[in-house]
Amino acid sequence: MKAKKVLVWLCAAAMLVSAAGCGSSAASTGSDAAGGQGVQEAEGTAKEDLPLAKYPEEVTVHLGGGMNPNAKIPEGMTYEDNTFLDMLKEDLNINVVYDWVASSSDYDEKMNLCIGSNTIPELMNVNAEQYRALLKYDLIQPIGSYYEDYASDKLKSYVESGGEALQKVICNEDGEMMAIPAPNITAGGVNEMWIRQDWLDNLGLEAPRTWDEMVAVAEAFVKEDPDGNGENDTIGILGPANSDYVNGNGGNRYGLDPLFSAFQSYPKYWLKDDSGNVVYGSITEETKVALEKVAGLYADGLIDPEILVRNDSSEPLLAGKVGIFFGPWWCGYTVGDATLAQEADWQAYFTPLAEDGKFYTHMAEPTAKYVVASKECKNPEAAFKIINYLIEYEQGWVDSGITSGLSTSDLYPLYNVYDNANEVEVSYDCLKKYLAGEIGIDDVDYSTHKLLKSDMEAITKLKKEPYDDFSLEYWNFEDEDLAKTNLPRLVSIMVGDAPLVNEEYVPIYNSFDGRTKTMDSKWANLKKLEEETFAKIITGKVGIDAFDSFVEEWKASGGDEITKEVQEELDAQQ
């Protein structure tokens, strides 16, 4: 644990140091790691202007591109020649050149080949697995020395919102900042219980919080005709469809993750104990206990009898046949049609709690998108400028119509969606205070909160008194267009995020999201073995003793070897 704290501290320090090698005003932007001097900033450029300062001489940066084959590119433009690239050249004097352009579906494969052959572009957008490979093979340069001067205040706000969890993954073992992240929304990895409050009311029940309470409510939902139609046609707990998984990494709509977390079981996660030893979460004794408990729910008819069989779990949900399902805060969109039709009152809770009364939850990785600079890149600060430019002007382009007909996500270089990791919690807090009259609409700084002002304007018209009760009956449906456009999002925030703000939870992060050598040849078969075994145990096709056989086979079929490799990777990061 001490080593982890030192790593976080070193990373934080690296992000705050003055730029050694880029100066505070008009210093060179060249990187020693690049083996050459980059273009200097214009003489007299103030430090505060560096994030969007125009180079006095043209700077060319080489990228790899992933093009959406369905993108609607205006006539006369191409992926390599378009308005966005023209604006970057005009306003920043940055000339973007694509070394190669692959279909977006083939981008990862192309990037993997480049990493394997050490022919990577100067600047690139990579996923977590690729980022770890680039670190492992020492193909990218530290960029922390540019962060203080070249990251705009907005970009810094996004990066710093991710806290220690995000800082840890963007740094190497020496605490140097190695990537510009696009933070994931923290709440997106927390699965909650969504439950029909109107069904609870019909049966005179309280919202369940413990495992036993949840079981009792699910049984009532199945056996006591909660929808009052006189038919035995209701589902207690919905499960995943045939193309989904019982458990997932991060947010997993319709998965049964909270049922496992209640027993501190985290399938598909690599977990480290206090001694630093790693274990795969799917083979622990806690997972065996959880599987047996979940199988019991299925045997008692409390879980969807068509779990992992039906084509689409949304169908029974939107048909009004489901009482409970699990998913992230944004499931207000999932139930949006039922809400707009005023047919179902969905509420969200941290359920089921563990025996110690705490809610344990797996978390999504702090980021899945990294912008990095190769060791050959002479102007890594250009990546900051390109991203700053997007963050500063993207909304204005939309509002003004300047980029009408252009899709920023399809054509802008190094494109990612940048937002605060805690954006949903901030939105919830501001909207609650606004409804309570504690703040006004002009009291909020919206510079890093893209949708908050429109949320505040919409909730003024859509929320009825009492302003602290977000049940179905207290929303206003008179303006159908306004409700259709805004209500699913407002329900997602005010209902879906309420537990994350008002209750405590214990976050569990995946300790390893990379790929080892043996994974390349054996992981697909191990994954299939796991998913098939879990499905058979849950649906009663095999007994719980099959779990022990699964663990033995998993270990013998490459699992032990992979675990050793993961351990070595994690030890090297300490």
Image (spheres, grey):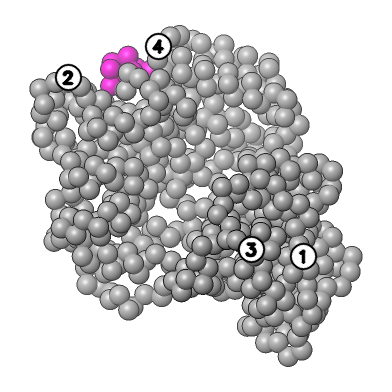
Disc nearest the viewer among 2 and 3? 3
Upstream in the sequence, badge 1 or badge 4?
1
Kindly indicate whether the residue at mark 4 contacts the one at mark 3 (C-beta within 8 angstroms).
no
Residues drawn in magenta: 294-302
Alpha carbons under labels 1 and 4: distance apart: 57 Å
Residue at point 14% right, 21% down? 231
Disc nearest the viewer among 2 and 4? 2
Upstream in the sequence, badge 2 or badge 1?
1
Alpha carbons under labels 2 and 4: distance apart: 22 Å
Q: Secondary structure at mark 3?
A: loop
Dividing the picture into quarters, in which one does residue 35 lie?
bottom right
Upstream in the sequence, badge 2 or badge 4?
2
Is residue 456 shown above or below 166? below
Residue 257: mark in rendering: none
Kindly indicate whether the residue at mark 4 contacts the one at mark 1 (C-beta within 8 angstroms).
no
Q: Residues within 10 Å of mark 3 (few under 14, many from 20)?
A: few
Provide the major secondary structure of the magenta segment. helix
Give the side of residue 547 with respect to residue 570, left or right. Answer: left
Total numbered badges shown on the rendered structure: 4
Residue 61: mark in rendering: 1
Residue 232: mark in rendering: 2
Q: Residues within 10 Å of mark 4 (few under 14, many from 20)?
A: some
Residue at point 63% right, 41% down? 105
Alpha carbons under labels 2 and 3: distance apart: 61 Å
Look at mark 3 in the image and give the residue it sits on.
Answer: 76
Q: Secondary structure at mark 2?
A: loop
Look at mark 4 in the image and give the residue it sits on.
Answer: 540
